[in-house]
Amino acid sequence: MAWFVLTRRVPEPLVVMGSRRYDSGEMSESAALHLQHYASTESPVVFPSEEKVPESTQHLKLRTLLYQVLHHAFRMEHSIGCDQFVYWSGANPRRCLAPDAFVRLGRPHELFESWKTWERGAPELCVEIASRSDAPDPPWDEKLEKYLELGAQEIVRFDWRAAEGQRLRAWDRVDGQLVERVVEGDRTGCATLGLHWVVTAHPELPLLPALRLARDADGVDLVLTHAESEASLRHAAERRLAEIEEELRRRGG
């Protein structure tokens, strides 16, 4: 099996307060009051946006496909993330997750290196594609607790290695807790987007089960990637042209 190593760029440290200490005589009382909130912070608070993580080719294909679907369909209305760090504590950079896909509603997509909830809000939808790094460290229950802290409303976990009918799990926030819903036949609703989660064959690797979004519960009307949408339009135009040519032949004959 081939493996990729993902590299996320680390920005310069975010320094909450410089190392210089001010005497009361060096500034006005109003300036001192403005800065006193930061006086106890001496060490930089750094929020990394990179980490070396091994990733199988299957996981890469599945993650990329899901991002392409979400980005093409929803980027004009919502923010889409894919494997970026999501931070929800400005005081503790260790409180973070890196979902394989996430969606923040009502905020048009823009480029970002990492996601800080105190700046952009918490993603409502987070998706995890199971990988070898999920077991034994960290256990899924611990990761689910982090999603609860993060404030996510819908969590979806897809395990392409599991047996058919057991590949898809989902949780919803109910009364402040993440409650697992009943999923049957590897299909369930996507409450966040008003669509359906389905498992189908990967378009490039037919033997690889892939997580997709569809407009119907049976997965017939899939939400397409940009490439799939372009191909669909091209095929429709070609069919229409063939129909016109056939009609002209009949009239001429």
Image (cartoon, rainbow, N blue to C red):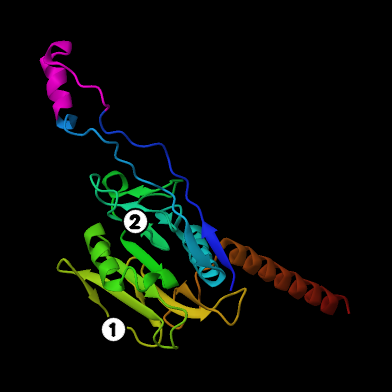
10 Å crowding of disc 1: few (<14), some (14-19), many (20+) = few
Q: Position of residue 105 (x, y in %)?
A: 34, 56
Q: Residue at x 30, y 60 (%)?
A: 124
Badge 2 element:
loop
Q: Nearer the viewer, residue 240 or 43?
A: 43
Pointer 2 with pointer 1, Cβ within 8 A: no
The dot on residue 105 is: 2
User: Could you say which quadrant of the image residue 98 lies in?
Assistant: bottom left
For residue 188, side relative to residue 63 (left or right): left
Q: How many marks?
A: 2
10 Å crowding of disc 2: few (<14), some (14-19), many (20+) = many
Quarter placement of the N terminus: bottom right
The magenta stretch is 18-36
Q: Position of residue 140 (x, y in %)?
A: 31, 72
Residue type at tag 2: Leu
Q: Nearer the viewer, residue 181 or 236?
A: 181
Badge 1 element:
loop
Quarter placement of the C terminus: bottom right
- Check if residue 23 falls in the magenta segment: yes
- Which of disc 1 and disc 2 is earlier in sequence? 2
Residue, disc 1:
182
Q: Residue furthest right?
A: 253
- Check if residue 216 falls in the magenta segment: no
User: Could you say which quadrant of the image residue 13 lies in?
Assistant: top left
Q: Position of residue 242 (x, y in %)?
A: 77, 73
For residue 24, side relative to residue 213 (left or right): left
Residue 182 can be seen, yes or no: yes
Q: CA distance from mark 2 to mark 1?
A: 25 Å
Residue type at tag 1: Val
Q: Residue at x 16, y 66 (%)?
A: 176
